[in-house]
Amino acid sequence: MLMEIADTLRTKLDPRKTLNSLKGDADPGNSSTGNGTGYDSENDSDPELHEERTGNSDTVKSSRNGKVPLIKLTDVWKVYQMGEVEFAALKGVDLEIYEGEFVVVLGPSGSGKSTLMNLLGCLDIPSHGTVSLNSRDISRMDESELAQIRGQMIGFIFQSFNLIPTLNTLENVTLPLEFQEEESSRARERAEYLLEIVGLSDKHHNLPSQLSGGQRQRVAIARSLAVDPPVLLADEPTGNLDSKTGNYILEFLDELHRKEGKTVIIVTHDMTPVKYATRVVHIKDGEIEKIDEVEGNFCKL
Amino acid sequence: MRNATCVKMALNMLLHSKLRSWLTIIGIVIGVGAVVGIVSLGDAMEAQVQSRLSDLDLAKITISPGYSGAQSRMGGPPGHGGEEGRGGSSSTDTKLTDDDVDALQGIDGILYIDTQISGSEEVDYAGETATLFITGVDPQVWQYMNSLEVESGRLLEPADKNVAVIGNSISTEIFDQDIGVNQVITVNGKSVRVVGILEEEGGGEDKRIYMPIDSAVDLIEDAEEDVFDSIVVKVESEDLVNPTVEEIEEKLMVSRQIHQEKDRDFSVSSSLSLVESVTAMTSAMTLFLGAIAAVSLLVGAVGIANTMFTSVLEKTKEIGTMKAIGAKNRDILMIFIVNSAMVGFVGGIFGVMLGGFVSTLFPYLGVTLMKGGSGTVTGLSPDLMAFGLGLAVLIGVISGAVPAYRASKLKPVDALRYE
Ligand SMILES: Nc1ncnc2c1ncn2[C@@H]1O[C@H](COP(=O)(O)OP(=O)(O)OP(=O)(O)O)[C@@H](O)[C@H]1O
Ligand SMILES: [Mg+2]
């Protein structure tokens, strides 16, 4: 069901528009890509695209009234056992994340942000309490179901990019589709399209080591979008980048949120992403201090 | 994950592996090379032994005087009995006589009994002299006991006196002038007419002279009437050889009034026991070499396992990333196992090449073993190559299994946090 929603949301995105608005201002040295050839064919060749549109612009908004949360944390504890000593990185966290939100989890170092993100992304299961995704408790899922969910519903963006160093740009972006057994020509087309969107069409055959940090993170974003997941999870996505490149990445995520209705969750200690957020979750010492609703972010720009 | 993806990822890992992981392949190369080399050596040896032994008549038993423990039972091929009796005997003055022949008469399964004397004597022909091996045989039965064929002339007949059948190379090689049928040679001053020339046999067989025993007694030094250098017995079939050997031993012990094994003064040997002991020897040798090869394979396997463990450790973060983007445990497992199988495969290719190279050296290394036979050692058979490659891949899979399993079981969070 989530995949379907994601697909319908995806139709809202005019790839040309995204490309035009994002290209250039982030990477002025890279203006070789351009004329809109291929986009139509990409759309044609994707039968997963649904013709029906929600037509309802509220979907994009953080719509909590009467809606089921996408991810729901109930009294979540994460306790690390280190020999004799126990350490609680999360102490009874309650959090609901809805479709179409842009959530920034803000907190100082060591406050448990990454721990929280691992739980939101089904990379880990809580020591106590429940994490439910789409009303299903992830503690009850087996390894392959969790892998399935990660592979289809969540796009990860890491602080240190985490590209596979021995695969080139194109192969890195194709990889999530390969794990989903997407047909290879279709996967390749999709990867080329996404690399074009992030402005790296001329870097298909570069290895990650042959890219700048900003370029690597753009490859990582393209990869996170490969399966067109409804949720994007980013842990300090700009932590290793200068502020200009960092801003480009954030703009891009904002664009994906506003135009494609992606649910974006950013975990950071930095205030910059807050301006794009629909909600800011302040976390400290493993507990949620407060949650700020930011109104009017959808009208920005 | 599709198989193609799995192979692609595994190949990618293989192509980007570091020099030191290539070094550990050497273990597999040497192991597979050794196994392939040894198997082909074993095959070659067996072929040699077979071709040498196929000439032997396995239904023959040779009795010779003197006894020097168990090894004399291995004996030599039939016809060599005389030489055997002289060497290694504990009591050279013991003799085989008509009494012994009589003792054998009652034994079931014996078809023919041939009494033989032999000696190396001077042979003159057309002004030249050569020392040749002369065997006096019983002309009544000799032609039935052998598969010898004449090239010209005939074999010995019961009424023959002072005639000889000579080996092929005596006729053509030993003397400048060829010896033909009905020509006369001189042995220790006495004239002997050649009635037959044997077909070429190869080896020492072609330098023998056969004569009726009654005439030979007069020519061979030290020979006495009714005293034999060996008694050769032909039995009905190969199956009867071993029981008949035992029965002959028993009968002779009784007739010669020997009560204890240590007083025994005769030997009974058969070609069959020779074949058996040679076969046992070659297979023991193959087994021994095989054990060495197995050890080197084991070392190779540990080497690959070690490389795989290191590789899994180095790729921990990548494994975490792959799991985060949707790889299942099974996918990770397969990628690493296929990678390990590929490492084995590469090792196998070089190993088979090494084995092939080693097998071309056999003629130089094992000349004495291989004497007489040539052409049997020509490279490796396709089956053996496939076996070598299969073995290498199998070892790759086995030694990669545990590291791959470990990789697949890594928890995504822990793997991602790994630095
Ligand atoms: N595997 C682990 N074993 C033990 N303790 C851990 C483990 N992982 C995290 N912790 C502890 O949990 C706490 C929260 O860690 P976490 O990584 O979530 O912090 P963070 O908020 O992401 O910090 P930063 O901004 O520096 O990344 C830390 O005190 C850390 O030491
Ligand atoms: Mg962190």
Image (cartoon, helix red, strand yellow):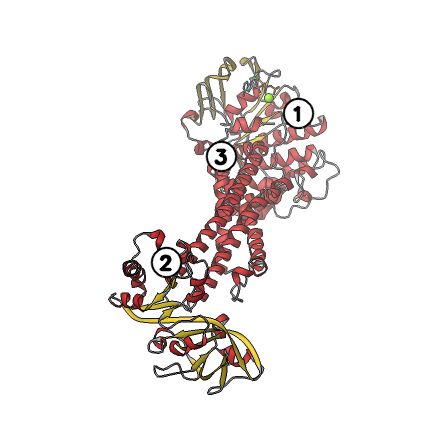
| Residue placed under numbered mark 3 in the picture | B408
- Mark 3: C-beta under 8 Å from nearest atom of ligand 1: no
Instruction: Using the numbered discs, state the Cα–Cα distance from disc 1 to disc 2 in whole angstroms.
Output: 99 Å
Q: Three-letter amino acid code at disc 3? A: Ser
- The numbered mark 2 sits on a residue in which chain? B
Label 1 marks which chain's residue?
A
Task: Let me know if marks 1 and 3 both belong to one chain.
Answer: no
Q: Residue at x 43, y 33 (%)?
A: A145
Question: Looking at the image, is mark 3 or mark 2 nearer the viewer?
Answer: 2
Which of the 4 quarters of the picture holds residue A217? top right
Which quarter of the figure is the C terminus of chain A placed in?
Answer: top right
Q: Look at the numbered disc 1 and say if its residue's Cβ is closer than 8 Å to ligand 1.
A: no
Q: Which residue is mark 1?
A: A239
Give the amino acid type for the residue marked by disc 1 in the picture.
Gly
Crowding near pointer 1: few (<14 within 10 Å), some, many (20+)? some
Front position in the image: B228 or A84 = B228
Label 3: how many Cα within 10 Å (few below 14, some 14–19, many 20+): many
Relative to the observer, which residue lies in front, B58 or B340?
A: B58
On whether disc 1 and disc 2 are found on a single subunit, the reply is no
Label 2: how many residues lie within 10 Å, few (<14), some (14-19) or many (20+)? many
